[in-house]
Amino acid sequence: MIYTVTFNPSLDYIVRLDSFKTGTINRLKYEKILCGGKGINVSIVLKNLGVSSIASGFTAGFTGEEIERQMKNEFNCSCDFIHLSAGNTRINVKIKADSETEVNGQGPNIPQQSIDALFAKLDKLQNGDYLVLAGSIPNTLPNNIYERILERLYHKNVNFVVDAEGKLLLNVLEYKPFLIKPNNHELGGMFGKTLTTPEALIEHARILQQRGARNILISRGGDGAILLTEKGDCMSCAAPTGTLINSVGAGDSMVAGFLAGYLSSADYKTAFRMGIAAGSASAFSENLAVMEEVDTLMKQITI
Ligand SMILES: Nc1ncnc2c1ncn2[C@@H]1O[C@H](COP(=O)(O)OP(=O)(O)OP(=O)(O)O)[C@@H](O)[C@H]1O
Ligand SMILES: O=P(O)(O)OC[C@@]1(O)O[C@H](CO)[C@@H](O)[C@@H]1O
């Protein structure tokens, strides 16, 4: 079973306009409201690729209800969210104009009893299950919360996938996550550096591997990705060419594609190809990647 947890889901308000100016009224050419948050996106793309998962995390208020409605009715995903009694799930604004601007909310407060409820659900995970922890946490929570989850489940041989930034990610490495997926900026940020070359990215990813990460997928937007595997292989791949339409969720799609590819083949090269194809398929379309788009792009990808 694959269980995804999004501590801080969002409704993504995606808007398009020719140019965006601060300090004045901007009129939109296009707008769409989509359920989002990294773990939720992973669940949606897994479903699109024919792999079932259960999406969990914390939802609140009318925005939380809309997320669950979309997940169930529009994306046909299984959900197991914990409902917070106060506040609203955040709304993240994604502005697509001459450049891309994102305004991500802070998210509601998560009380201790809701954390306990999540832990009780996670205690049911079994040997061989996959647990995807993805995205930020509301800033009222301590940044060792992911670490506490991995510590609690470590003895069970659960395969952890963690897509998070900074300390949230660094703190889990000792629990040997199956996969981590920093993008190039996040990887550099963990070392207080800007890493520009593949060599520098690989050198720093190896440090995370020495600290415990089994497989590391470094995404590089339109420049493709690099994979370091637990077998000692290092692979690099360019992204397929296409027109960028909406990169929101490209990284989450890559995680889903990698998992779907690995589960169907037990082969890291296949997983990597499917990860790149799913990431790029999402970047090249308004919505998250679907099977047909991924199949088409996979044919263009050589490692
Ligand atoms: N402009 C692009 N052209 C082609 N492929 C892209 C583009 N942007 C993203 N991708 C694909 O998606 C993958 C993940 O993208 P990226 O590195 O932007 O992830 P991310 O920063 O985690 O994104 P997000 O947080 O929005 O989900 C890339 O490795 C690439 O395969
Ligand atoms: O604020 P976080 O949790 O880091 O990121 C949240 C978010 O930007 O990530 C997804 C894309 O990866 C979006 O659906 C969502 O709005």
Image (cartoon, rainbow, N blue to C red):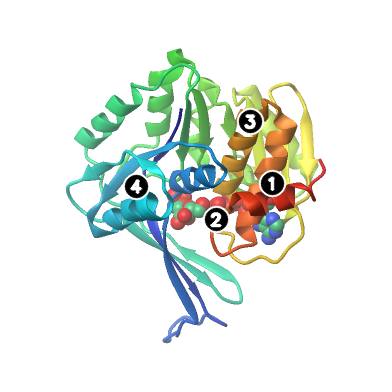
Q: Earlier in the sequence, mark 3 or mark 1?
A: 3
Crowd around label 3: few <14 · some 14–19 · many ≥20 (10 Å): few
> In whole angstroms, how far apart are the C-alphas of marks 4 and 3?
34 Å
Can you identify the residue that label 4 sits on? 138
The answer to whether the residues at label 3 and label 1 have Cβ atoms under 8 Å apart is: no
Q: Report the amino acid beneath label 2.
A: Leu
Query: Dot 4 lies on which element?
Result: loop
Q: Residue 300, position in %: x, y?
A: 80, 51
- Which residue bears the numbered disc 2? 288
- Distance from disc 1 to disc 2, alpha carbons, whole Å, reads 13 Å
Instruction: Tell me residue 14's x, y (percent).
Output: 47, 68
Three-letter code for the amino acid on which mark 3 is drawn: Ser
- Identify which amino acid the numbered label 1 is placed on: Ile
Decide: is 45 above or below 31.
above
Q: Amino acid at mark 4?
A: Pro
The yes-or-no answer for disc 1 within 8 Å of ligand 1 is yes
Q: Are marks 4 and 2 in contact (CB under 8 Å)?
A: no
